[in-house]
Amino acid sequence: MQLPLIGVLLTLCALHLPAHAGQISAINSTARALGMGDAYTALADDSSALFFNPAGLSRVSGLNWKIFSLRVGTSGLDAYKKISDLSGAEGSDMADQIEELYGEHIYTGLGVESAFTAPMFGFAIFDHADALVQVDNPVYPEISTSVINDYGYVAGMGAPIGPFFEFGVAFKYVKRTGARVPFAAGFLADLDTELIMSHLTGWGKGYGADAGFNVVLPAPFFKATFSTVWRNIGQMHFRSDNPDVSIPFEDNDLTLGLALQFDLPLVSIRPAIDFRYLNSADYQLTRKINFGVEVGLPLVDIRAGFREGYYTYGVGMNLGLFQVDAASYGAELGAYPGQIEDRRYVVEFSMELGVGNFSARGADSASGGGAGGKSGKGGSSSRSIWGSGRLKQRR
């Protein structure tokens, strides 16, 4: 009986081995953010604020429904077939195949969500999944894996506090399955298939909270936003009804962000920088710094940046009701920048409707530029494909 690859990965829920510390997860990131180095904390001002910075909900204008968003990412296509062949190998054959795969790694990601936002409020339902398989340890090859599947709900509120300050909180309920563990070839060769399958339904439930604070300094032709965000306050743990299943927790993340926004006729320029995991000593400082820039044109956005020391790039296209974003970024799988790069590619397709141009700071601040609101396409977020001033397309 052949065991499917995903079954082999999810089996790790049953193991009690030390976690493999490598990549910084991007499970809740968007293709737009990844294209500009994942430096998005101070820029999030739509439904993405529910995952990046709830204070950004204070800048939402109008009523907006992201009907759906589908995100797909992958890497290591050449290694995929080799790793898939492990499902048909047994005993010493499996050990030999794993040894030949030393240095290979493959990543697959999938995200689906739907969200509603209004001034100072947002709600989303989502299903995000990431799977990474890496073969390392040249002396005694082992497979290091990180398999996470989250689905749940998040609701947040953000409000302006005076002319220059914004504060927001988000609360989430997540049901998670997966594991982050290494295992040796001999273990897979000897493991009983029924034992593997018995752990595929092991889920854990968790509750978490994020808090964000922005300082916004407006000027006639640009604005600067300084952000502080604490994600997963006090860590986010998952409880399972099965005592034999160990579900990975989500670590808390203290992030500082800075973004500038220049709105010019027909173009907007947004440079940004994030300092992540400032409360953690698990990652070197250079891995915690992300920065990038987005240049918004009437129909196309162009993005570039650096994430964990690796370059990123991306593009976004506004197709009326639909938005298409694509990006490439590097993820560090080793302990320090430049050790093991996993080059990844992600595409995101979404459909969104918006009505109105009112916000917590008034209609003027929601029209883009200056002190207020979202520039998305150079301040054209209030454009309507229906020829009405009330229906709009949101970036």
Image (cartoon, rainbow, N blue to C red):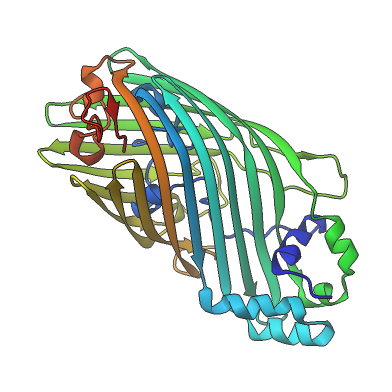
| Residue ID at (33%, 50%) | 291
Image location (x, y in percent) of residue 203: 76, 45
Q: Is residue 27 visible?
A: no
Image location (x, y in percent) of residue 53: 44, 32
Above-or-below relation of 283 to 55: below
Q: Nearer the viewer, residue 54 or 142?
A: 54
Q: How many marks?
A: 0
Image location (x, y in percent) of residue 38: 40, 49
Q: Residue furthest left?
A: 265
Q: In this rendering, would 253 be left or right of 330? A: right
Q: In this rendering, would 171 be left or right of 8? A: left
Q: Residue furthest top?
A: 162
| Residue ID at (89%, 62%) | 195
Image location (x, y in percent) of residue 221: 12, 31
Please identify the quarter of the rendering in which residue 192 is found.
bottom right
Quadrant containing the C terminus in the rendered view: top left
Quadrant containing the N terminus in the rendered view: bottom right
Above-or-below relation of 272 to 387: below
Q: Nearer the viewer, residue 287 or 112?
A: 112
Q: Residue furthest front?
A: 386
Q: In this rendering, would 66 be left or right of 10? A: left
Please identify the quarter of the rendering in which residue 151 is found.
top right
Q: Is residue 262 visible?
A: yes
| Residue ID at (83%, 55%) | 199
Q: Nearer the viewer, residue 393 or 203?
A: 393
Q: In this rendering, would 240 be left or right of 133? A: right
